[in-house]
Amino acid sequence: MIVKLATENWEFEQLFGLNYQTFVDEIPQHQENETRQLVDKFHDKNKYIIALQGKKLIGMMSINENRPFSLDNKLSNLESYLPPFSNGFEIRLLAVKNEMRGTLVFMKMFAKLYEIIEERKYDIGLISGILSQQKLYSKIGFVPFGPLVGNPPAQFQPMYITYEKYLKGLESMNLVAKL
C-alpha cells in the first residue's frame, strides 16, 4: 500500500468514482448522475491524500486550508464554537473502499496527514463526521461541537481536533512510533 498526495489524472478519476460510491450510493448526500463520478465543489482548493494498492485507489480524504470551509457555509459564526487558532484546515470526503474497511488504510491516511500537519504547521483541523463513526473520530481525538449538519439520512457532527489532541490520538493508536 502506498499513501500519497494525488497528482495523476488516473488517481483523480478514481477518487471521483470513490467519492460517488461513498456520498451518492452509500450516504445519499448528493444526486445520482450518469457518469457515476462526483467532483467536489471545493476540488480546486483541495489536496487529496490517497491510498493505493498498485494502481487501484482504496482510500481517500481531502484537505482544504482555504476559507471559507464547507462548515463556514453550514454554521454561522464558526469561530464561536472553536478554541483560538491561527492556521486551520478542513478534512472532507473521507472514504475507504468497502472491502478495505477495518484494515490499516484509514490509519495510514491519518499518519500521512500528520506529515502534512507538521509541514504546514496547522494548529486545528475540522471535520463533519458521519454519525455512525463518532466512536472512531473520538478515539483519534476529535471533539464534537455545534448542531448536526446535513439532512437525514446524511447527517454529520461538526468536530475539531487540535494539534496536541491529534498527537495523543496517534499515540493511542500506536502510530507515533511508526512515523
Image: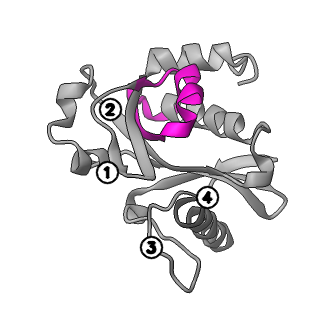
Front-most of residues 130 and 160:
130
Q: CA distance from mark 2 to mark 1?
A: 16 Å
Front-most of residues 141 and 26:
26
Q: Which badge, 1 or 4, comes first in the chain's sequence? A: 4
Tell me the SS state at disc 3: loop
Is residue 111 shown left or right of residue 160?
A: right
| Image quarter (top left, top right, bottom left or bottom right) of the C terminus | top right
Cβ atoms under marks 3 and 1 closer than 8 Å: no
- Closer to viewer: mark 1 or mark 4: 1
**Residues in magenta?**
119-143
Cβ atoms under marks 1 and 4 closer than 8 Å: no
- Closer to viewer: mark 3 or mark 1: 3
Query: In terms of image quadrants, where is residue 15?
Result: bottom right
Is residue 99 shown left or right of residue 97?
A: right
Which residue, given by chain and number where applicable, does mark 4 sit on?
6
Front-most of residues 178 and 100:
100
Question: What residue lies at 65% left-to-right and 32% top-to-bottom?
Answer: 111
Front-most of residues 102 and 25:
25
Q: CA distance from mark 1 to mark 4?
A: 21 Å
Q: Amino acid at mark 2?
A: Asn
Q: Residues within 10 Å of mark 1 (few under 14, many from 20)?
A: some
